[in-house]
């Protein structure tokens, strides 16, 4: 999967400084949140720095494609503004790393993907599956919106704002894709450090997990 992940030229033109470190984790043994994953979230909250310049860089990126970051916040901005609830051990792990490192991180069930992940400017007719009022529903991105997608539709809207239902990580997820996204002035060595800490926590959850990474940068 990693060798087929792509970032469209239109996105690179919008933010030439964008880089994403993609990580696959195969053979996960996930489970409900526990004392260890709650401690990760608590420690991350103590270390969070909402004034980190990386957060503002993402707000600027949202404005560049027409989104209003005070209304639909970049994922890391939203996480830093609230107490992050425990979801399951793997989600808790990457949410904690996201807050601690001021870094947007997407976590997806790669078994639910249809074709490779790619970051594109939306046409506006792509399907995005959600739950509305307790019922399955389909929405569509705005034309020009930056989205992650696969062959079946949008997997995450507004770059890293909200993921679809289909690819969410659950306690039954065995194989996952993580997308760690950075903009200037975020150092690449800090990006790699975040990936290393995420890998360590995934191995704590699942000692036999098989992890591979790929950096896409220009």
Image (cartoon, grey):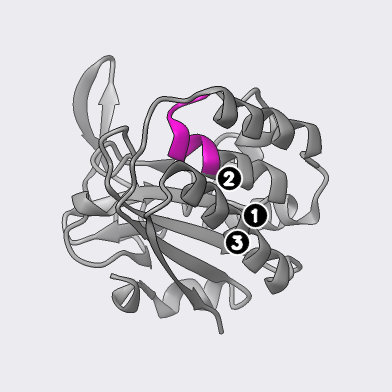
- Whether residue 157 is visible, yes or no, is no
Label 2 or label 3, whichever comes before in sequence order:
2
Nearer to us in this view, 178 or 145: 178
Whole-percent x, y for residue 143 in the image: 36, 56
Q: Give the magenta-colored segment's residue range.
A: 86-93
For disc 3, the marked residue is 196
Quadrant including the N terminus: bottom left
The image quadrant that residue 73 belongs to is top right
Name the foreground residue: 206 vs 23. Answer: 206
- Circles 1 and 2: CB atoms closer than 8 Å: yes
Q: Which residue is at the front of the view, 40 or 190?
A: 40
For label 1, the crowd category at 10 Å Cα-Cα, with few meaning under 14, some 14 to 19 and many 20 or more, is many
Q: In terms of secondary structure, where does tag 3 sit?
A: helix
What kind of secondary structure does the magenta stretch mostly adopt? helix
Q: Mark on residue 74?
A: 2
Query: In the rendered image, which residue does mark 1 sit on?
Result: 58
């Amino acid at each position: 999967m990693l060798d087929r992940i792509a970032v469209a030229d239109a996105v690179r033109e919008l933010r030439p400084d964008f880089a994403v470190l993609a990580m696959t984790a195969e053979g996960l043994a996930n489970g409900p949140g526990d004392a260890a994953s709650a401690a990760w979230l608590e420690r991350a909250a103590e270390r969070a720095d909402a004034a980190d310049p990386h957060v503002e860089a993402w707000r600027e990126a949202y404005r560049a494609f027409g989104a209003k970051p005070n209304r639909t916040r970049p994922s890391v901005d939203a996480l830093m503004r609230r107490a992050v609830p425990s979801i399951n051990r793997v989600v808790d792990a990457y949410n904690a790393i996201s807050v601690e490192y001021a870094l947007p991180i997407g976590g997806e069930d790669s078994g639910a993907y249809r074709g490779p992940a790619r970051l594109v400017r939306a046409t506006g007719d792509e399907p995005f599956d959600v739950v509305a009022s307790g019922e399955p529903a389909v929405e569509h991105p705005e034309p020009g919106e930056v989205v992650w997608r696969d062959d079946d539709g949008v997997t995450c809207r507004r770059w890293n704002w909200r993921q679809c239902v289909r690819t969410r990580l659950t306690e039954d997820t065995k194989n996952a894709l993580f997308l760690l996204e950075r903009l200037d002035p975020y150092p690449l060595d800090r990006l790699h450090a975040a990936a290393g800490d995420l890998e360590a926590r995934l191995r704590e959850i699942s000692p036999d997990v098989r992890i591979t990474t790929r950096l896409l940068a220009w």
